[in-house]
Image: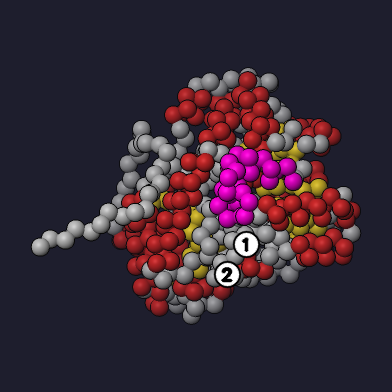
Amino acid sequence: METKAAPPKQRSWAEPWKVKVVEPLKTTTREHRRKAMAEAGYNTFLLRSEDVYIDLLTDSGTGAMSDRQWAGMMLGDEAYAGSRNYYRLQENVRNYYGYQYMVPTHQGRGAEHLLSKIMIKPGDSVPGNMYFTTTRLHQELAGGHFVDCITPAAHDPADQSPFKGDFDLAALERLIRDVGPDRVPYVCVGATVNMAGGQPISMTNMRAVHEIAQRHGIRIFLDATRAVENAWFIQQREPGYADRSVASLLKEFCSYSDGCTMSGKKDALVNIGGWLAMNDAELYQRAANLVVVFEGLHTYGGMAGRDMEAMAQGIEESVADDHIRARIGQVQYLGQKLIDWGIPIVRPIGGHAVYLDAKAFYPHLAQDEFPAQRLAAELYLDAGVRSMERGIVSAGRDEATGKHRYPKLELVRLTIPRRVYTQAHMDVAAESVAAVYQQRHDARGLVMTFEPKYLRFFQARFEPKG
Ligand code: F0G
């Protein structure tokens, strides 16, 4: 007799959108990929996108815009000064993030550049919850020195603490005491923390950082690039917040800071754009003056009117609870599959990406044989899935000694673009990771054959060892 399985009791979420336009993908042979990888110097940043099947390099500028955003592109007011779209963007930054003033920039690092130049004096220390590549470089170029004050749990891929983006408050206090508050221009808060695996910081910790900073008269600037995703984790994980909307949590979170830098290419669902925001009128005057030197007039910065319109609309869409649940839900789906198969990833699963623990994949490789760089190459070779190294290559060289920095985390990031891929793509990517994991014992290291001066991970070239 045929037996039928009982229907499942669970109720699934589904994406709160349907597909209107599709972009064909190309599959390639292993031989084609082998040649492409060699030509790219074993650096996934140097591959042609055409040679990639499923592109999990980054969630930056790779999202799909909505029909309303595309319609908004037609409302672009391309006036040099005082564009209508600028005012809508300003209003939405005020309404959703709560900051009074805003200067548009071409993307996040444009805002980081301006902020670093305005705030940092040579010799200053800038504490933060783990570095981000472009953020730290701009701080250093302005003469500052980044000091990592993240909780030690963030450096352990297996630690399952719910808020691994939290500050180590004692470390923050210690730094302020050691260098003196007037040598700390601001505290740089990342939410979520990209290099730690997309880990969130709790509302409680943010409030405590605010209290410390206030006590010493130090400002806080938030890297709000994925702050909406951070707000979702607060809603899901932090006691007392389950009934609050993501939008209200975002606004409260931002209220503990004095301003933010923003890459609109992530949370805000656009292909290009960003901003620098603040509450202080005098700081705004300085930013508005400096932006005309490096980006453009203060009412467009580095953006076209149509792009500001798309970003203003994107902000509204980004804070919708059903959007963010499906967005992070997809990341969790991919991560959970890998966990179920015993594949070593950073736990808990982050907001925008699943991070493979390359040290655990390839324990036989030394860190200066670039295990994560190798793993990213192997993944591409297997099925054309593109990922990104987030380990020793990304960490770069120490300013003072010129030696490699050896980060505790040696990771490969599978980053999920927003509203782009389906669950089936996640299945294919997961199965490819599993296949590469099966062959992990055979992997050899790499040697670096070309190393650019700044942000070397973007353009460095490698060859297989031996
Ligand atoms: N801050 C964070 C946390 C980021 O992840 C990024 C970019 C930036 C700032 C800089 O913004 O690219 O618009 O200039 N992250 C991308 C990534 C590149 O792939 O993680 P941008």
Can you give x and y, in whole percent of width and height, for residue 352 in the image? 52, 52
How crowded is the residue under tag 2: few (<14 C-alpha within 10 Å), some, or many (20+)?
Answer: some
Q: Which one is in front, 188 or 95?
A: 95
Identify whether 323 is placed above or below 120.
above
Q: Examine the image and state in which quarter residue 21 appears.
A: top left
Residues marked 2 and 1 touching at CB (< 8 Å):
yes
Can you give x and y, in whole percent of width and height, for residue 377 in the image? 43, 63
What label sits on residue 143 in the rendered view?
none
Q: Earlier in the sequence, mark 2 or mark 1?
A: 2
Q: Is residue 442 visible?
A: yes
Span highlighted in magenta in the image: 230-256
Q: Residue at x 78, y 36 (%)?
A: 279
Quadrant in which the N terminus appears: bottom left
Quadrant in which the C terminus appears: bottom left
Furthest residue to the bottom? 364
In space, the residues marked 2 and 1 are separated at their CA atoms by 8 Å
What label sits on residue 159 in the rendered view?
2
Q: Examine the image and state in which quarter residue 335 appears.
A: bottom left
- Residue 181 lies in the magenta stretch: no
Secondary structure of the residue carrying tag 1 is loop
- Residue, disc 1: 164
Q: Residue at x 42, y 56 (%)?
A: 333
